[in-house]
Image (spheres, grey):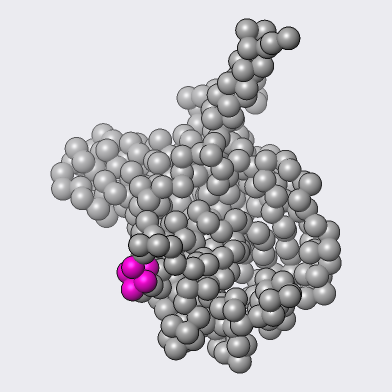
């Protein structure tokens, strides 16, 4: 799930850095490191006070009483409200959140933990839009985020602190244009699509909810634009009642595979042997991506390639024949499983913080160039 660990920053020394104290309390338990779970962490002040005209009860309920999962020490939360600092972990299983919450019980500033649902506008505003991404965590590996190539704010001492807390592999990572004004993905509607897709997968992936959250996070790393097709497929499937509506689900599924191929292996006019790799040949490009990472393992390449063929054929079958609803749902889930298999071939290669924002970047650069043109210069 997406889990927010909540802290009362009034419990810490005013002369000190409460984030450092909170960070040390959380990571000194070793629980996150031992879990090996691949997560992203955002940090920051969730609430810092009440503005004039705000209803404290309504704000409290919006922030803390709209979660599917809650492990809150209510008296601490009531006493600390509204001075709340948050550590928001994306892709944290509830069992891990419970273990960490119990370990932090003796820590005076800890108020508890809740699940976050970004399709709910107050959660989106408080726990996503206001809290910048800070770390990528995976076992003993840690990456500290910076945005849009701006490394000036990178603090090596922060990595040294995390090394003392057990992280042996530390470095910085560019998050690209994600969570900037260049994107249009930070909306409740976008996260409704994400939730619809995730709910579909929860009942069909081997690891249930934990697997669906992990795949969702990895898809966002590659391109949040993929959820436009995935969410459309999941939403249409939920309400589909006839053959035509199921065909629309299959169209969305095929469009997703086309966009996935564009992200993993962009179209090229240069063929590979007898295999064309142009825009229309998305199946071949998915094969080519696997081939590039499995040159020394032809048996596994063949297995994955045949799965690419099967999933493409299943989705195409949904366009032209009367397929049962469950079979169409299975084909969408299989496309997700195939995605996870392809991602596992090269986890680092799939992260592209700029891919989904290229059109916005080109427009932005073009506008800057126009403002600096001869017609706009004076002197």
Which residue is situated farthest in the left direction here?
242
Whether residue 337 is visible, yes or no, is no
Q: Residue at x 32, y 40 (%)?
A: 250
Q: Residue at x 62, y 87 (%)?
A: 107
- The stretch in magenta equals 55-59
Q: Nearer the viewer, residue 369 or 290?
A: 369
Residue 301 magenta: no
Q: Is residue 254 left or right of residue 270?
A: left
Our reading of the magenta stretch's main secondary structure is: helix
Q: Is residue 158 left or right of residue 182?
A: right
Q: Residue at x 62, y 22 (%)?
A: 368
Residue 132: x and y in percent read 60, 56
Residue 371, placed above or below residue 60: above
Residue 13: x and y in percent read 69, 80
Q: Nearer the viewer, residue 6 or 239?
A: 6
Q: Residue at x 43, y 62 (%)?
A: 51
Q: Quadrant of residue 110?
A: bottom right
């Amino acid at each position: 799930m997406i889990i927010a660990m909540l802290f009362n920053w009034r419990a810490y020394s005013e002369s000190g850095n409460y984030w450092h104290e909170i960070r040390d309390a959380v990571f000194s338990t070793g629980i996150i490191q031992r879990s090996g779970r691949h997560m992203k962490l955002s940090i920051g002040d969730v609430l810092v006070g009440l503005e004039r005209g705000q209803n404290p009860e309504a704000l409290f309920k919006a922030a803390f009483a709209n979660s599917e999962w809650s492990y809150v020490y209510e008296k601490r939360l009531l006493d600390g409200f509204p001075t709340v600092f948050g550590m928001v972990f994306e892709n944290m299983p509830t069992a891990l959140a419970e273990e960490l919450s119990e370990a932090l019980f003796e820590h005076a500033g800890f108020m508890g933990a809740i699940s976050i649902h970004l399709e709910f506008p107050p959660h989106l505003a408080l726990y996503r839009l206001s809290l910048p991404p800070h770390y990528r965590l995976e076992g003993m590996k840690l990456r500290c985020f910076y945005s849009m190539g701006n490394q000036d704010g990178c603090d090596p001492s922060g990595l040294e602190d995390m090394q003392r807390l057990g992280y042996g592999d530390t470095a910085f990572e560019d998050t690209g244009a994600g969570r900037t004004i260049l994107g249009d993905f930070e909306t409740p509607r976008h996260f409704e699509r994400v939730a619809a897709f995730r709910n579909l997968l929860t009942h069909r992936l081997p690891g249930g909810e934990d697997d669906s959250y992990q795949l969702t996070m990895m898809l966002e790393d590659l391109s949040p634009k993929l959820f436009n097709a995935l969410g459309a497929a999941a939403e249409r499937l939920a309400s589909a009642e006839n053959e035509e509506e199921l065909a629309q689900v299959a169209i969305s599924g095929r469009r997703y595979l086309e966009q996935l191929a564009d992200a993993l292996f962009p179209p090229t006019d240069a063929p590979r042997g007898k295999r064309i790799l142009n825009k229309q040949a998305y199946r071949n490009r998915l094969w080519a991506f696997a081939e590039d990472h499995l040159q020394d393992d032809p048996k596994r390449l063949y297995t994955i390639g045949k799965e690419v063929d099967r999933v493409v054929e299943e989705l195409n079958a949904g366009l032209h024949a009367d397929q049962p609803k469950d079979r169409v749902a299975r084909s969408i889930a299989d496309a997700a499983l195939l995605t996870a298999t392809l991602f596992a071939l090269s986890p680092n290669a799939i992260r592209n913080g700029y891919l989904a924002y290229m059109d916005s970047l080109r427009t932005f650069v073009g506008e800057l160039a126009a403002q600096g043109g001869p017609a706009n210069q004076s002197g």
